Amino acid sequence: MGLNSTNVVGDLLPKEVEGEGKVVAEEVHSENGRKYVVCLNRERREDQLENLDEIRDKCEEKLEELKQKAEQGWISSSKLEKKVENALGKNKRLFDYEIEGELSYQLDEER
């Protein structure tokens, strides 16, 4: 099992880390004689979680707007997927969505 730094950060950010103080460290993985340790600054974590919530909210607003426009016939279903991808950008990993006649989406709770 190799570690992908993007997944590790995303997976660990919302988890509780034991320890006292503003900064804590915890071993999260070991392989081939190597240990991987995550250091957490609690204040920075809170800021990042707030930022993530804001990003999710903005993306949901964009998705809802696109969904309504598609339902009203302002966007063709053939162009809807591209518009959804453009609206979400790098944040599309935060959502599960389908376009089958109409747009349906939900927040990916694992992210």
Image (cartoon, helix red, strand yellow):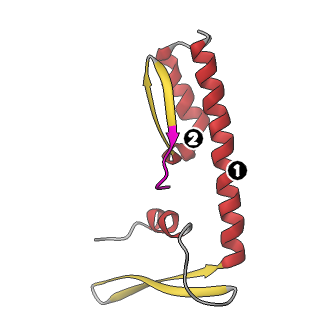
**Contact? badges 1 and 2 (CB < 8 Å):** no
Residue placed under numbered mark 2 in the picture: 89
Query: Number of marks in the image?
Result: 2
Give the mark nearer the N terminus: 1 vs 2.
1
Q: Check the image and report above or below for 18 versus 73.
A: below
**Residue 101 picture location, percent across and down:** 44, 16
The answer to which quarter of the image holds residue 58 is top right
**Residue 25 picture location, percent across and down:** 55, 87
| Magenta stretch, overall SS | loop
Residue farthest to the top, as pictured: 73
Q: Residue at x 67, y 35 (%)?
A: 61
- Confirm whether the magenta stretch covers residue 109: yes
Determine which of the numbered discs, if any, sits on residue 25 in the image. none
**Residue 7 picture location, percent across and down:** 45, 63
From the viewer's perspective, is the residue at label 1 or at label 2 nearer? Answer: 1
Q: Classify the position of the N terminus by image quarter.
A: bottom left
* Direction from residue 54 to residue 25 in the image, left or right: left
- Confirm whether the magenta stretch covers residue 63: no
Q: Residue at x 66, y 79 (%)?
A: 41
Estimate how packed mark 2 is, as few (under 14), some (14 to 19) or many (20 or more) residues with alpha carbons within 10 Å.
few
Indicate the amino acid at tag 1: Glu
Residue placed under numbered mark 1 in the picture: 54
Q: What are the residue bounds of the magenta stretch?
A: 106-111
Indicate the amino acid at tag 2: Gly
